[in-house]
Structures are given as C-alpha cells and as structure tokens.
Amino acid sequence: MISALLRLLVLPLRAPLLLLLVLIAIYEGMHWSTSSTQLSLEWVLECLQAVLVVLICTMPDLLLQRVSSVMAASRVMSLVITLLVVTIGGLYLLHLKVLANVLILACAVLLARLDLARVRVAPPPLVLSGSLTALVLSGAVVGRLLVR
C-alpha cells in the first residue's frame, strides 16, 4: 500500500510530460471564459470540451471500434454518422481559437500518454481517462482561480 502510494507520488518525476499537461491545463483554464467570475455556461462547455478531448485521446481504439461496428451495420447509419461528424466537427472547428485550444490540449494528452508508456505505466483505459481528465480539470480550475 505504501509502496504503491510512493510510486504514484514519484510518477510526475518519472513521466515529466504529466507536469506539462497540468501546466497546459492551468494555462487553458486562465483563458477560458475569463469575462465572468461566476460559474457560467461557457465555463461548463469548455470543461466538457476538455473531457471530450481527453476521452478521444485516451480511448481511440474503443471509441472507433464501437463507431465502426455501428457504421458496418448499415449504409444508412454509415452515411448519417459521417454527415453528423463532418457537419458538427466543421462548424465547431471554424472558430480558430477553439481549434487551437483543442489541438494544444490533445497534443499534451497524447504526449502524456506516450510518456506513461515510456515508463511502462499502463492502467486500464477507463482509469487512465479518468485520471487524465481529473488532472486537466483540476489544472483548469487552478488557472481560473489564478485569474481572479
């Protein structure tokens, strides 16, 4: 028990890109909806965007397997899913600020995953996704508190 806790505490030293992920989350949190001090709808949407980016970056094989099995079921579902993804993704990414935030956060999450693989830390996908989401959201909250 104590050795597992010690290994967890030493993990940021062994995988320093986790610290980079937290720093990027703090930076992003400082710039997300800084206009209001209250909990706003913009802040909630930015947090949901961060959760979605982390989920896509940590569990791509599981998500793609599920989507491809639905798309393989029928041509209609394939067309509907493709049109939905292209239309919503295109409309969403038309805002350059959003595109930059998504790309920066996605790169940081993927680099953190790569660093964890380098030090041979491979938790199950749901655990990894949950822990990286917690890191990103806690960093964003710290960044928001620093702006106040």
Image: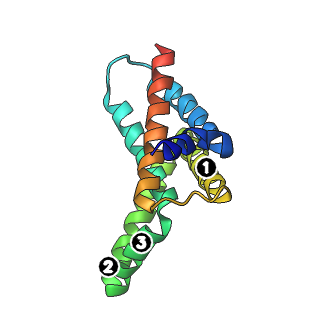
- Name which of mark 2 and mark 3 comes first in the sequence: 2
- CA gap between label 1 and label 3 equals 30 Å
Q: Judge the density around disc 3: few (<14), some (14-19), many (≥20) Cα neighbours within 10 Å.
A: few
Residue at label 2? 77
**Image coords of residue 122 (percent x, y):** 54, 60
Of residue 117 and residue 37, the one placed in the foreground of this image is 117
**Image coords of residue 74 (percent x, y):** 32, 86
Q: Is residue 55 visible?
A: yes
Of residue 37 and residue 95, the one placed in the foreground of this image is 37
**Image coords of residue 5 (percent x, y):** 49, 42
The residue type indicated by label 3 comes to: Thr
**Residue at 48% across, 51% down:** 53
Q: Is residue 101 above or below residue 53?
A: above
The residue type indicated by label 2 comes to: Met
Residue at label 3? 82
Q: Is residue 81 above or below residue 3?
A: below
**Image coords of residue 79 (percent x, y):** 37, 77
Q: Secondary structure at mark 2?
A: helix
Residue at label 1? 112
Q: Judge the density around disc 2: few (<14), some (14-19), many (≥20) Cα neighbours within 10 Å.
A: some
Q: Is residue 74 visible?
A: no
The residue type indicated by label 1 comes to: Ala
